């Protein structure tokens, strides 16, 4: 794709020129202007703006203001440059007429002619693109006039139209059903990819965008998986993303149903009509939905709703809209994984990437690029591949049969390794292949074969057909139908015999499946149920793909207890390098980004000269937050909630008294974060047995988070109790569902308590290996720094649940004597650290804390 890069630099706008929906705060002005400079200069920016400061809206307005001005500059400068080059050529031609050396004169004008040709070509592509956008806007206008009509076609009409391209070709991985790239050259403008952690956070971006002037001109599209966007009831009923992908692609590969029902074969009677192509993928309807989605900002739920209303596939419409969109919203899981980018057709070349809520970016990269395969999956994969091989063995070419045998051999060796292992251990990738004795198999070539031949889907389809086949009965003779099917199968085999040795795997699969397809069509609808679990072949191939990565980047955890092999990514730099190379500029933002040293060392070590860091304070007044470090309990005992001491009776008693006393003076809601679910249960039991729970309940209703249960109902009851009574106490867990992404504004969170320092389990094999790797790569002590930072980022996330807007206020209590240390306190958010009150015994102890808390809320 062609793209024009302006020579002229854009000037940074004034604060009032960013299209902010209200008068921006000072830190919002600074963030928008600094962001503008980062995008213009092609830099990498790391920004921290506390939760509740309007960070996401600020990022959106800053980025879109730059994009609008950049596009205007591209058009004006391109036209001006064409005029200037034409004048230069005209002057050179006049000089050439007077020159005595014709060759010298032609040489001088050659570069100008080439530049002019390139500029005119770019202008033509740009005008062509603008013409397409104008036509799209006209189509949307005409369709909006007919919105009162039902745009859903009849099912029969939808089936007759050509479905949208699935692009499931042999050259692509079978899950990479990306739309086919147009062959003609097109102009490629700069796009902004805005990523956040969840779709609900992206929906808030759309809601805020509509309040700004940018919402009227920007072409915005939300990307998601089939789980969010698919409207086909058959696919949606499968729930799991893997099964939904497989079913959708299976429907796409179905042949079009016969238009005349009276001419159907008797063997196809009883087949559900839904076994044909998906009617929601009708090309005209997908194009119509695409135009509508680009004409006004829609969040992911609104896009799915529009698809259902129009009878079109929202998933494929969003992908079709990707090329013409200016602002693309997507969860960062879809951006950070190369296979997901390829599947969605994302091209980052020359684009801008904004990653919001990026405090756990390193963890997300490690999680996305890890892979795990369990013994049960390996055994099932072995069974399915062997069954597939035995069924079609005579039809495979020698080369393809070799690849299938290699895959079976690898599966058997992995099962053998799990069977012989007695204890957990870490292996490098080459150590696993050597121990499994398949080090001499070219995994790259094997994976390419599986992708090219759509091996996983074919094995899965064969296994599904085998499951649907009726079991033979010894007491009953074969039915007439089964005899017919056997005869058809034999006839098909006889037809194929002369060419059997020369057929490729793909051709033989289609030919040999003809009789089986007739048999499958003859079965009643009730037999055509989806699998209960996804195919094991894809997890197997994903695990084998990790074995092709650099041995220094990861390790294999062999765990006989859980009967699994798990690949752990230790160095995410390689996985992020393609994004870093392709994107024009990258913005990493979050409410709790500090400490950032690991992020810079692991992801941006190769571009330190492009790196910009900015950390902003909170928008609330300085007296709106009162943070305490409480090293001693009400009875004076030192508070140290480490794993060894937090369960002793003295600590339990101190914590129960502390909760009881604070609940007497804090209005509204109190949220207490504890290190683990086990410790929460222990505290709750102690509160009940000691009578503290009853005493607290006289003042506030008490709620607790339960592992594995949805948080929505709990939060609803908690909020209702605060409105109808004097308040409520919510016991939750650091790292749980309530510690990230939730809003405890106003009375929902007048106080936040963090009990102890929530260090993760240091004995975890994964954590041990990661710390050892950091020590080796970045120097001694880097592993401990990483370990401590994991803890402090979790603490900072908990603190950020309260104080969500400029008029909000709250108290923060850090309950542990270790918070007194300078090292720990230095990793707290700046807007908390500079106001901390240390409640030491010599400064009045806990009594002073209770008194200051009462005065703080009395003045509100």
Image (tube, grey):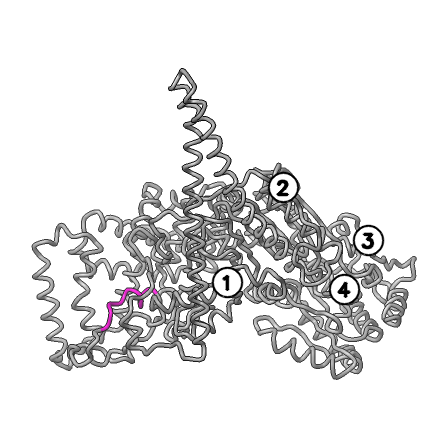
For the residues labelled 2 and 1, the Cα–Cα distance comes to 29 Å
Is residue 403 shown left or right of residue 352? left
Residue at left offset 13%, top offset 78%: 481
Q: Quick check: is 592 in the magenta stretch?
A: no
Of residues 773 and 14, the one drawn nearer to the viewer in this rendering: 14
Q: Secondary structure at mark 1?
A: strand
Kindly identify which residue carries mark 1. 222
**Horizontal and vertical percent position of residue 189:** 48, 49
Is residue 302 shown left or right of residue 235? right
**Horizontal and vertical percent position of residue 530:** 34, 72
Q: Residue furthest top?
A: 100
Q: Secondary structure at mark 2?
A: strand
Q: Of the residues under marks 2 and 1, which one precedes in the sequence? A: 1
Q: Inspect this view and state whether residue 137 appears.
A: yes
Kindly identify which residue carries mark 2. 611
Boundaries of the magenta span:
249-257
> Which quadrant is the C terminus positioned in?
bottom right
Q: Secondary structure at mark 4?
A: loop
The tag on residue 834 is: 3
- 2 vs 1, front mark: 1
**Horizontal and vertical percent position of residue 525:** 27, 79
Q: Of the residues under marks 4 and 1, which one precedes in the sequence? A: 1
Q: Of the residues under marks 3 and 2, which one precedes in the sequence? A: 2
Kindly identify which residue carries mark 4. 806
């Amino acid at each position: 794709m062609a793209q024009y890069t302006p020579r002229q630099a854009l000037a940074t706008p004034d604060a009032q020129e960013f299209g902010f929906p209200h008068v921006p705060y000072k830190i919002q002005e600074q963030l928008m202007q600094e962001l503008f400079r980062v995008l213009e200069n092609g830099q990498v920016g790391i920004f921290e703006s506390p939760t509740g400061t309007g960070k996401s809206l600020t990022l959106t307005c800053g980025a879109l203001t730059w994009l609008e001005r950049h596009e205007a500059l591209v058009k004006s400068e391109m036209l001006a440059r064409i005029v200037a080059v034409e004048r230069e050529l005209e002057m050179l031609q006049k000089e050439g007429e007077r020159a005595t050396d014709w060759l010298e004169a032609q040489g001088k004008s050659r570069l100008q002619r080439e530049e002019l040709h390139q500029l005119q070509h770019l202008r033509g592509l740009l005008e062509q693109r603008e013409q397409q956008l104008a036509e799209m806007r006209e189509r949307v206008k005409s369709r909006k006039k007919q919105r009162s009509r039902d745009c859903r076609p009849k099912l029969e009409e939808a089936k007759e139209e050509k479905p949208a391209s699935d692009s499931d070709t042999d050259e692509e991985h079978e899950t990479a059903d990306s739309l086919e790239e147009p062959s003609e050259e097109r102009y490629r403008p700069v796009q902004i990819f805005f990523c956040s952690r969840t779709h609900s956070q992206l929906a808030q971006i759309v809601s805020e965008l509509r309040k700004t002037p940018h919402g009227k001109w920007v072409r915005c599209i939300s990307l998601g998986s089939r789980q969010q966007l698919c409207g086909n009831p058959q696919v949606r009923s499968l729930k799991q993303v893997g099964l939904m992908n497989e079913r959708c692609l299976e429907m796409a590969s179905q042949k079009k149903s016969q238009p005349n029902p009276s001419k159907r074969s008797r063997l196809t009677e009883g087949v559900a009509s839904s076994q044909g192509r998906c009617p929601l993928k009708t090309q005209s309807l997908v194009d119509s939905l695409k135009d509508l989605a680009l004409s006004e900002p829609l969040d992911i739920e609104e896009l799915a709703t529009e698809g259902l209303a129009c009878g079109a596939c929202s998933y494929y419409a969003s992908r079709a809209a990707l090329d013409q969109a200016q602002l693309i919203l997507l969860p960062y899981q879809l951006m950070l994984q190369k296979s997901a980018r390829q599947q969605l057709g994302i091209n980052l070349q020359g684009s801008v990437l904004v990653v919001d809520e990026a405090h756990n970016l390193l963890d997300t990269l490690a999680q996305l690029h890890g892979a795990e395969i369990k013994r049960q999956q390996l055994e099932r994969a072995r069974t399915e591949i062997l069954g597939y091989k035995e069924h079609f063995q005579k039809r495979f070419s020698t080369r393809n049969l070799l690849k299938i045998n290699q895959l079976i051999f690898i599966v058997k060796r992995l099962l053998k390794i799990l069977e012989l292992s007695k204890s957990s251990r870490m292996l490098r990738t080459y150590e696993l292949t050597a121990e499994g004795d398949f080090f001499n198999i070219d995994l790259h070539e094997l994976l390419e074969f599986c992708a090219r031949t759509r091996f996983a889907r074919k094995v899965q389809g064969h296994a599904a057909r085998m499951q649907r086949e009726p079991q033979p009965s010894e007491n009953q003779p074969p039915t007439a139908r089964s005899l017919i099917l056997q005869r058809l199968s034999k006839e098909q085999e006889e037809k194929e015999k002369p060419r059997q040795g020369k057929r490729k795997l793909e051709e033989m699969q289609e030919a040999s499946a003809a009789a089986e397809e007739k048999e499958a069509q003859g079965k009643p609808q009730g037999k055509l149920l989806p699998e209960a679990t996804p195919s094991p072949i894809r997890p197997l191939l994903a695990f084998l793909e990790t074995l092709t990565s650099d041995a220094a980047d990861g390790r294999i955890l062999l765990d006989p207890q859980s009967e699994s092999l798990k690949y752990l990514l230790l160095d995410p730099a390689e996985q992020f390098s393609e994004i870093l190379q392709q994107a024009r500029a990258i913005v990493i933002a979050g409410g709790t980004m500090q400490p950032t040293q690991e992020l810079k060392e692991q992801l941006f070590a190769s571009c330190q000269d492009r790196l910009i860091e900015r950390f902003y304070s909170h928008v609330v007044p300085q007296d709106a937050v009162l943070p305490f470090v409480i090293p001693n309990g009400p009875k004076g005992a030192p508070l140290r909630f480490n794993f060894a001491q937090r369960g002793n009776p003295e600590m339990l008693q101190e914590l129960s008294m502390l909760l009881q006393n604070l609940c007497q003076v804090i209005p509204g809601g109190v949220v207490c974060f504890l290190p683990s679910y086990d410790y929460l249960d222990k505290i709750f039991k102690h509160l009940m047995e000691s009578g503290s729970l009853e005493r607290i309940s006289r003042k506030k209703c008490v709620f607790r988070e339960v592992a594995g249960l949805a948080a929505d109902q709990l939060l609803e009851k908690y909020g209702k109790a605060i409105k109808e009574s004097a308040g409520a106490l919510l016991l939750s867990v650091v790292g749980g569902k309530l510690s990230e992404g939730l809003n405890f504004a106003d009375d929902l969170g007048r106080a936040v308590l963090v009990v102890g320092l929530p260090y993760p389990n240091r004995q975890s094999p994964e954590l041990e290996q990661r710390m050892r790797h950091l020590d080796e790569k970045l120097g001694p002590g880097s592993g401990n720094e990483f370990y401590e930072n994991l803890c402090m980022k979790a603490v900072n996330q908990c603190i950020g649940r309260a104080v969500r807007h400029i008029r909000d206020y709250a108290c923060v209590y850090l309950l542990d004597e270790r918070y007194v240390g300078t090292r720990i306190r230095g990793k707290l958010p700046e807007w908390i650290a500079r106001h901390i009150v240390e409640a030491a015994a010599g400064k009045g102890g806990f009594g002073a804390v209770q008194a200051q808390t009462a005065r703080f809320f009395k003045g509100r």
